[in-house]
Image (cartoon, rainbow, N blue to C red):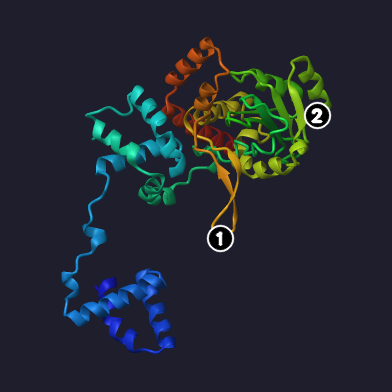
Amino acid sequence: MTTAIQMARKYAQAYDTSSRKDKGRLLDTITVATGWSRDHARHQLRQQLALMAEGVSPDSVPDRRRSKPKKFSLAARKTLQFVWEQSGQPCGKYLEAAMPECLASLEAHGHLRPGRDSYSEEVREELFQISAATIDRYLSSEKSDTTEDVLLSGSGTGLRTSVSLHATKLLAEPEPGYFVAEYIDPDHDDDRGPGRRTLTLTDVRIGWVRTVSFEPDADPVKVLAEAVASIPYIVTGLLISPELPLDEIEEWATERMVAVHPISAINHGIRLAERKRKTVDTLQSVIKNNPHVDIELANDIWDALGDRLNFFMPVKNPIGWKRTPSGVRRRVYDDPVTPIKRLLDSGILCPAQTREMEEYTASLDIAELTTRIKNIKTFLDIAIHEGN
């Protein structure tokens, strides 16, 4: 079997003496056969020509990619895959930032123990050293094989709302407590009546998320009030999407000293709900009108997703813009940090609240949350299939 290097050696002399047009044809042949880029193919052809001139055999040239030892051990790579699966399969950027919280939870609940399944203190230190790019490279084959719903992924894409802090600087307070309230109507009404609705609250500052589904005849103000009451710290303001009854919410919020603004006040308009609708539709089994699916069970999956996002998955905030050396304008973000850490670091909680949040964090098992999410999703899929 001809290797890529042998092919480059075979065509090196012909490439050197060919016309520009013929060189292009040779490059096309080599890139198709080897998978190399054209630049790499040119480099290999020139290198092989130089080695031929020196009389060096291709068999005597080591393949440095194959001979170079892996930076991280096999045990560390296997454990990395386990942590990635149990944390909801996030991308490397978020898994790198969440590694301390994920390992602490997996160790505390017995899923990872030194001396069992090749896990050790050395492996633990290796996991802390793996960069985001290396994580994505090690997990590339697993990611290509996965069929996990995007809404169930650990990063929370589609559940959290990203709002520029600069856009809210005239409205929002500097500490956590200002939430974007989005009402998502799935537009799946049929002959059985209107479908179920979803309300998502996202803290602009720290990314804390609370999502609930409710029946179409439920009072949206009451649903909003219950969602706000379930948030473990004081809600000081709400940015309301256009689908929600602003006047009724303002009347409710005035009694509780909660500031209320329409989303249009920060020039985002209806785009937030439109962008989120597609992602919420990926979990249609939760909000679809189906008599076989209990609304409480539908909300169980949101509760599990919320705990995994709020306590284990980091969020980054857009904080400004910058120009690249080429003059392209790019968004600037702060470092990814979990919402619970942002909340504890903010100092807005009293000592009793801080202690309560720390105890609840320690009680959470990220592997159990992920299993619970998958089990409920499977049950809902089966119920909907039988209902149809």
| 23 on left or right of 202 | left
| Label disc, if present, on residue 58 of the rendered structure | none
Question: Label 2: which residue?
Answer: 245
Displayed quadrant of residue 282: top right
Residue 369, position in %: x, y? 46, 28
- The amino acid on which the numbered mark 1 sits, given as a three-letter code, is Ser
Above or below, 13 relative to 77: below
Few, some or many residues within 10 Å of mark 2 (<14, 14–19, 20+): few
Label 1 sits on a secondary structure element that is: loop
What residue does disc 1 label?
326
Looking at the rendered image, the quarter that the C terminus falls into is top right
**How crowded is the residue under tag 1: few (<14 C-alpha within 10 Å), some, or many (20+)?**
few
Does residue 80 sit above or below 254 in this rendering? below
Say which label, 1 or 2, has the lower sequence index.
2
Q: Can residue 27 be seen in this view?
A: yes
CA–CA distance between discs 1 and 2?
46 Å
Where residue 6 sits in the image (x, y, percent)?
25, 75
